[in-house]
């Protein structure tokens, strides 16, 4: 399978998704938008993955490539190809499905629990996922559930932490995919956001328990396996 992913920051890559893709012999390619690289046509890949970033979906004046990225996402949604969005990627997908994306009541940065919805618990995609799990967050924006989508998770301050849309689109506001290098990169490049607000952890709290990363990566691999099985793409 041809998997293409989009990076918005040099320190927000695939994390453990790359490990999974290599193990399963998938072909990987990437657009580094922060360097000015151009996006491919939607017929170039079987599956598009959109990673996170510090920008907001409504900052097109500052990041003009957001316009082309949104067009590509719309094309992928219309084509029925597989689509995975994480953090900013999830917000972009929500936006292209007609949902409002806006500032959350608080920033959520660090390891905080998310809870699966009843709808998610009934999906085979989440059959190996605990109903409650501490996951990694780094976001200040949130989104409403798109029309026709299934809400999959929520947290103490974020009612919609992700959704499934027509079985081929998965949006996650949080980060199952982070490895130690990814978390360290976010911390090094985002120290100004660690402002001691109620749902923002400090650096020792964020970096202090690598075991959480390993278990989240295990969950990410299980979800990716089932996502592929559900869609049964022609490879």
Image (spheres, rainbow, N blue to C red):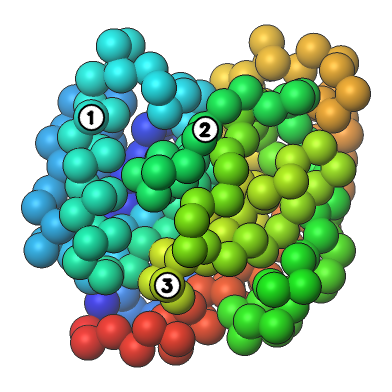
* Residue 3 in view in this figure: no
Sequence-first disc among 1 and 3: 1
Pointer 3 local density, CA inside 10 Å: few below 14, some 14–19, many at least 20: few
Q: CA distance from mark 1 to mark 3?
A: 24 Å
Query: What residue does disc 1 label?
Result: 67
Q: CA distance from mark 1 to mark 2?
A: 16 Å
Instruction: Tell me where residue 219 appears, x and y as whole percent.
Output: 67, 70
The residue drawn where x is 37% and y is 55% is 49
Q: Which mark is residue 166?
A: 3
Pointer 2 local density, CA inside 10 Å: few below 14, some 14–19, many at least 20: some
Instruction: Tell me where residue 207 appears, x and y as whole percent.
Output: 79, 38
| Residue 95: quadrant of the picture | top left
Sequence-first disc among 1 and 2: 1
User: Which mark is in front, 1 or 3?
Assistant: 3
Q: Quadrant of the N terminus?
A: bottom left
Q: Which mark is residue 101?
A: 2
Q: CA distance from mark 3 to mark 2?
A: 20 Å
| Residue 196: quadrant of the picture | top right
């Amino acid at each position: 399978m041809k998997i293409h992913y989009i990076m918005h920051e040099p320190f927000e890559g695939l994390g453990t998704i790359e490990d999974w893709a290599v193990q399963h012999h998938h072909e990987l390619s990437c657009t580094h938008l922060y360097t000015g690289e151009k996006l491919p046509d939607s017929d170039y890949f079987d599956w598009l993955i959109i990673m996170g970033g510090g920008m907001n979906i409504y900052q097109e004046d500052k990041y003009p490539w957001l316009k082309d990225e949104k067009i590509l996402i719309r094309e992928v949604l219309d084509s029925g190809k597989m689509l995975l969005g994480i953090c900013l990627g999830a917000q972009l997908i929500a936006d292209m499905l007609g949902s409002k994306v806006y500032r959350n009541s608080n920033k959520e940065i660090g390891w905080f629990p998310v809870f699966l919805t009843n709808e998610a618990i009934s999906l085979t995609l989440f059959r190996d996922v605990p109903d409650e799990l501490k996951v990694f967050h780094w976001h200040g924006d949130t989104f409403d559930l798109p029309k026709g989508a299934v809400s999959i998770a929520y947290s103490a301050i974020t009612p919609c932490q992700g959704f499934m849309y027509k079985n081929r689109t998965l949006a996650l506001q949080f980060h199952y995919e982070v490895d130690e290098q990814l978390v360290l990169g976010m911390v090094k490049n985002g120290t100004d956001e660690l402002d001691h607000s109620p749902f923002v952890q400090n650096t020792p709290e964020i970096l202090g328990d690598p075991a959480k990363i390993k278990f989240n990566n295990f969950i990410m691999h299980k979800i990716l396996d089932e996502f592929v099985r559900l869609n049964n793409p022609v490879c």
